[in-house]
Image (cartoon, grey):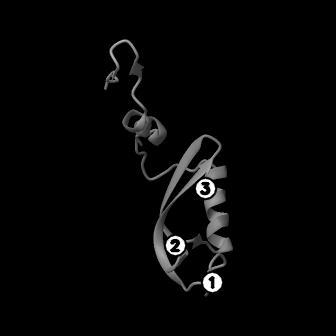
Amino acid sequence: MKCSLCGGKTKRQIINYEARWGKKLYSFKDVQALVCESCGDISFSHQVMKEIDRIIKKHEKPERYEKVPIFSLQKALSHKTAPRPYDKKNHQENLLPP
């Protein structure tokens, strides 16, 4: 089968898939998917998508729960790339606190 995005060749694979529903994040393992070997786009059969929707909507009990740390990449990068404030009086740049 060809990729609907780039026309590349797709391959059947078992993957892990994450889906957001409102503010909640759901993680599915052992999901049958078609993955493009060129661009990495993932597509699912109608049956797989229907089952994912059903599980989320019915609030089925998961196998397990995991805590997931959340990071702000923008915040992390701003500490590294932010310009240093200039001190006119001493004609030097002040170091920002870590």
Residue 45: x and y, percent?
64, 75
For residue 7, the mark is 1
Q: Quadrant of residue 54?
A: bottom right
**Mark 2 nearby-residue class (10 Å; few <14, some 14–19, many ≥20):** some
In the depicted structure, whether residue 27 falls above or below residue 12: above
Please tell me the numbered disc located at residue 55: 3
Q: CA distance from mark 3 to mark 2?
A: 25 Å
How many other residues sit within 10 Å of disc 3, few (<14), some (14-19) or many (≥20)?
some
Q: Quadrant of residue 36?
A: bottom right
Quadrant for the C terminus in the image: top left
Q: Decide if residue 34 is on the left or right side of residue 54.
A: left
Disc number for residue 44: none
Whole-percent x, y for residue 76 in the image: 41, 37
> Which amino acid is tagged 1?
Gly
To which quarter of the image does residue 52 belong?
A: bottom right
Query: Which residue appears at 46% of the width and 69% of the height?
Result: 15
Label 3: element kind: helix
Q: Is residue 89 left or right of residue 52?
A: left
The disc, 2 or 1, on the residue closer to the chain's N-terminal end is 1
